[in-house]
Amino acid sequence: MRRLAALIAFALPACAHSAPAPGLCSAESERLVHSATARLAAEGEHPTKATYDASVADLRRAALAGNREAQYELAKTVIGFWATCCDPPADRRDEVVTAFWMLRAAAKAGHKRAVDFAQGVLDARPPAEPPFSLFPSEWLNEAWNKPDPVGSCSP
């Protein structure tokens, strides 16, 4: 029985529930962050839907691979967009939940800009002030209740 437990422990890293994207090395995640932020900066405050969607996809991929800067940039982009634009439609729930989840992950890891992004990001429950109050509480609770992503598996 001990041998089986050892094999399982060896085969499943501590962060297996959100392991890094296969083949996404650190240099690739840095490239994704750079290209996404450059595309967004080139279009200014109001990017096209295509630019926004492509940038969010790249940032999400790098963020889920454990890139702390991508986690912060994803949150800043998604939360900033929906907080200044309009109420996010229901089909953007996963995007918003992931953004808040990644913001908290980066802040917990000590990313200074993530910690400073919004007071309360490290609280045990979602704060009731903006920008948090601008989003459905169910979505925030979902983000707050997700386990810490990638952890020591971070590239």
Image (tube, grey):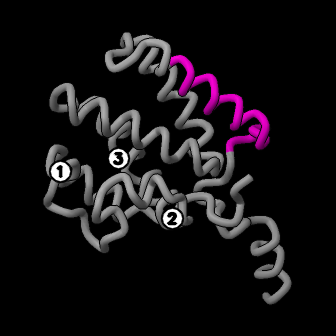
Q: Earlier in the sequence, mark 1 or mark 2?
A: 1
Residue 19's disc is none
- Whole-Å distance between the Cαs marked 1 and 3? 16 Å
Q: Amino acid under label 2?
A: Asp
Label 2 belongs to which residue?
A: 148
Q: Nearer the viewer, mark 1 or mark 2?
A: 1
**Residue at image coords 39%, 17%:** 44
- Magenta segment, prevailing SS (helix, strand or loop): helix
Residue 7, image x and y in percent? Answer: 83, 74
Q: Amino acid under label 1?
A: Pro
SS at circle 3: helix
Label 3 belongs to which residue?
A: 97
Contact check, label 1 and label 2, Cβ < 8 Å: no
Q: Residue furthest bottom?
A: 2
Q: Quadrant of residue 3?
A: bottom right
Q: Quadrant of residue 29?
A: top right
Label 1 belongs to which residue?
A: 130
Highlighted range, magenta: 21-39
In magenta segment, residue 34: yes
**Residue at image coords 65%, 60%:** 16
Residue 6, image x and y in percent? Answer: 82, 80
Q: Is residue 142 left or right of residue 22?
A: left
Q: Earlier in the sequence, mark 2 or mark 3?
A: 3
Residue 25, image x and y in percent? Answer: 79, 41
Q: Is residue 152 left or right of residue 33?
A: right
Q: Nearer the viewer, mark 1 or mark 3?
A: 1
- Whole-Å distance between the Cαs marked 1 and 2? 23 Å
Q: Earlier in the sequence, mark 1 or mark 3?
A: 3
Vertical side of 97 occupied by 80: above or below: above
SS at circle 2: loop
